[in-house]
Amino acid sequence: MTTDVLGSPVKRVEDPRFITGKGRYLDDIQMTGMTYMAILRSPYANANIRSIDTSAAKAMPGVILVLTGADVPYNPLPMAWPAGGSSGVQNNINMPRALATDDVKWTGEGVAAVIAETPEQAADAVEVVHVDWEPLPAVVDTEGATQPGAPQLHENAPNNVVFVWTVGDKAGTDAAVDAAEVVVRQRIVNQRLIPNPMEVRGDIGLYNPGTDEYTVWMSSQTPHIQRLLLTAFVTGIPEHKVRCISPDVGGAFGTKIFCYADMALVMLASKLIGGRPVKWVETRRENYQSTTHGRDHVTYLEIAGKRDGEVTGLRVKTYANLGGRLSTIGPGVPTTLYARVLAGCYKIPNVYCEVTGVYTNTTFVDAYRGAGRPEATYVIERAMDLFAAEIGMDRAAVRRKNFIAPDAFPYDNPSGLGTAVNGEKIYIDSGNYEPALNKALMTVGYDDLDKAKAEARTRGKHLGLGLSTYIEVCGVAPSKWIGAVGEGWGAAMWESANLKVHLTGKVILTMGTQPQGQGHETTYSQIIASELGLAMDDIIVQHSDTLGTPFGYGSYGSRTSSVGSTAAIKAAGKVREKARRYAAHMLEASVDDIEVVGAEYRVKGSPEKKKTLQEIAFALDLGFSLPEGMEPYLDETAYHDTPNCTWPFGTHIAVVEVDEDTGKVDLVRYVAVDDVGNKINPMIVDGQLHGGIAQGVGQALWEEAIYGDDGQLLSGSMLDYALPRASWMPNLELDETVTPSPVNPIGVKGVGEAGTIASTAAVANAVIDALKPFGVRHLDMPFTAPKVWRAMQSQEVRS
Amino acid sequence: MIPAAFEYDRPTTVAEAVDILARNPGTAKVLAGGQSLLGLMRLRLARPERLVDIGGLAELRGIRALPDGGLAIGALVTYREVLDSALATSRVPLLAMAIADIGDVQVRNRGTVAGSIAHADPASDMPAVVLALEASLVVRSGSGERVVNATSFFEGAFVTDLAEDELLTEIRIPAQPTGVGMAYRHLEQPASGYSIVGAAAVVGRTGGSITTARIGVTGVADAAYRASAVEAALIGTDGGAAAIAAAAAHAAEGVAVGSDIHADAIYRAEMARVHVRRAIEAALGAAG
Ligand SMILES: Cc1cc2nc3c(=O)[nH]c(=O)nc-3n(C[C@H](O)[C@H](O)[C@H](O)COP(=O)(O)OP(=O)(O)OC[C@H]3O[C@@H](n4cnc5c(N)ncnc54)[C@H](O)[C@@H]3O)c2cc1C
């Protein structure tokens, strides 16, 4: 019963509280003396502040404190991942401030904060803060911002360029493109998205004047990192004087990885008002304007190859919009997390990519579910389709021909995509791409595609099918690589676990990772139950509090199952080993003679001589009788630094129907064969895929953050920003191949982002396939009905 | 997302309600299901000083059968009540056809048909429906009651014939000609679910040619309208595919077609033609 809990679809232990409204999210926290903060946000996208008059706000009922940028003694928010890490690439850095001082760079940048007795009073008072604005012309266009004549945002960033970063083999790729039989070129846009976690962000700051210590509750994926950033970089408060706590977090998708102004403001405000707690919870509108956005690339791709289908080169130039100032790891996303995986699962001998980071008068852009890898997958999977179309070869056959062979792992891209400064490298750990493709093609009935298209025509529909044979990287690692190259926070990327078996035999696992709805409490319990032979009911998983939790880097980048789980397994191993040694003491046997069977520690050959883990823990925790040199208590901590990233892969196939009259696209079938290695809990894996796929489909079909030329966010609410709905999704036909990862003991890879990374390209390719009869070679997302309808019209209507 | 402060009244009679409206010109707002009004207030795009909650007005409840075979829908009747009413769905099937797609369960449980009509969002569905049904709207103020034909009620985006001191009390839908079929076809704006274009059709044939053609269109212009050019072109034809398509080609005639981030004017006008055609086809399919 306990032995096979690992790998079985156990129901999530979190769900009873989440689905009955008993979760405890940030805004559920009530405290005596609570005060409430509201933030005045810039109505302009680009403007200078001549002066701010807070007198009327200060006189409003219930107002305790009004802050402007001049009142904040802190540093700007840190930017921790420059393009190129420590390689010396010029980065023209402009960091966000806790509150604007003399200018704003996007609509929604924070300008003043009001702390009042009630949220209503704070909202009323913030309206009467008077700012004397000098509005300036704005620029929102990703590529246009770098062109001559564009408004300039920052003195240190001529032409609004943050950096120009390159990777790969320029000379080789230029030569390959020049010499190629076929070169296909296309400009493609990966539009800006608004991540939309169900729970918006918020914080509570509590200063203790008696101890001069702070506690900050935050809806964050990274409480330990935030403590580090807030103390060492922003406030200068000593790290041990601050405690950060993430309560239940209701979704994040990357947006809650980062350091935000509000975190620092609630700390400062609580101190200034003598230690009353200060709560801030953003509105959905604020979330749209001042929590990070995702994607927003303009890319020029060139794919070169032979008429027989062999791809010989890929040259890519990308403009990546990073917003008005840089978010915490903004530049890292469109560089390393994007371009190092641009060749996808293909053996492309010559690859070169140049990325230009761009400032515009828009909300800052940072990691959003998949972070760089969906953008890369979109480029390479569109490129493969364009190339196949150009040479008149079957799309699946072109992919098959170029797959990295199963015996070529660990695979090191010949152009050096995985090679960073100092020659440090990351490899693709494992893969076997063709079985997943074949399985998916079989399931979808690829050979009958023409028949399906003809049948759809009889119903006034144009049917299209799209492939996405993707790979992705989970758990940026190892720390050695990061240390050498200065990428990825510029901080290490190991994980931690502490495991205690208490006197009563109950087990508490304390992790440095930080769930946001993924079900970590369940999956970690499954692992510990399996490792120690216990019932899941006897285990509880704690996390999210810098007090009492070993330092951890939090959860993002699908790192938890690979890196965090291994730390937990190591801690369990240490517990088992100590229990074994103590069992030997109790049973008066030699340690070597003790064998562990589930939770029983037996003397080999005399199975009646045994102690259970509970019995061992009871005696060891009391410590009345300890062998020489053994410390009391069954309490072990382990840190794990993974030797490499893990590389899930698979094939996703979307089938769409386009209405001939309206251009409306319906997703009618979706087949996904994913290889995420071994699974801790297949039901949770499916859930991650379901949500991830829907999110990626959302980008392909509906979602787009639209700014007016003046920098106003036109898609500023859910009335205008279209999120996917459950009823728009077909039944998802999921299947698997299993290629265990060699880099961790349970062979898992990670699945938090795979669905999103794969699905956007599959749907895009399907829509463009459906539009083939109209001579459409490429169309940019999202494929809204008006856009698709236009593509189906005659040349006159289109232009 | 916190509304500005307001006063709150909950009158118990229509007379009392209209009296409050008369005494607070320009500053009071009627609150029915709150599905449109409260959202605007939370964004502080609407800041009424006083809300007159009509939820306690028993006079405005319920769906009544009219002796002529028609239907009277009280101002407090929610979408859900219409969907659940055998009377409403059998006498006027068009109502449920349009309502089934409006908002979500919560919106349909709280939102009222009258509230949608009074609000007159240019993308809302009910205006097209009441136009096609030739409904009339009963309006009360301190100076009495008047009855307005739907065709002269919708004046512009969020602008109606309703004066500030008037309350919409009832929607009267006359008996529909025997043998007509009804249908509603629309294209949803994917974010809001409101209609980029919505077309309501009440169409019937007598002796092989079309004798009834009433087409209401929403989403296309500032205000919902009767597509009279379509109706004129359809009447007297055989109602075959060619005749319907030819008639539907007039769907956006005579109106200034709107344009926004979700659909430009060219597309909207074309979608008006497509959905008017589809609604007519479906209505004729449903006709006896
Ligand atoms: C999430 C969401 C989705 C929606 N989707 C759709 C959709 O797909 N299609 C669609 O058509 N609509 C849609 N709606 C709008 C919805 O139909 C309307 O909000 C609702 O019907 C309005 O009725 P109410 O009773 O809630 O009105 P309220 O919000 O209470 O009032 C709306 C306005 O009408 C006035 N008013 C209300 N009743 C009267 C009266 N008897 N006399 C005078 N004035 C009055 C109010 O003063 C106010 O100005 C949606 C709304 C939401 C929130």
Image: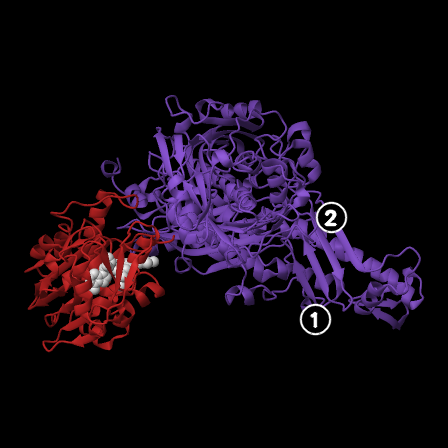
Q: Position of residue B105 (x, y in %)?
A: 35, 65
Decide if residue B210 is on the left or right side of residue A322: left
Instruction: Name the residue at 11% across, 47% down.
Output: B254
Total marks drawn? Answer: 2
Name the outermost residue toward the front.
A59
Which quadrant of the rendered structure holds the C terminus of chain A?
top left
Towards the viewer: B64 or A599: B64
Chain letter belonging to callout 1 = A
Chain letter belonging to callout 2 = A
Q: Secondary structure at mark 2?
A: strand
Q: Dot 1, how many residues are within 10 Å of its Cα: few (below 14), some (14-19), or many (20+)?
A: few
Instruction: Name the residue at 54% across, 23% down.
Output: A175
The hue used for chain A is purple
Instruction: Name the residue at 59% across, 66% down.
Output: A11
**What label sits on residue A1 in the rendered view?**
1
Tell me the amino acid under the disc marked 1: Met
Towards the viewer: A102 or A539: A102
Q: Secondary structure at mark 1?
A: loop
Q: Which chain is red?
A: B
Circle 2 residue: A639
Q: Dot 2, how many residues are within 10 Å of its Cα: few (below 14), some (14-19), or many (20+)?
A: many
Query: For ligand 1, which image quadrant applies?
Result: bottom left
Q: Position of residue B218 (x, y in %)?
A: 20, 54
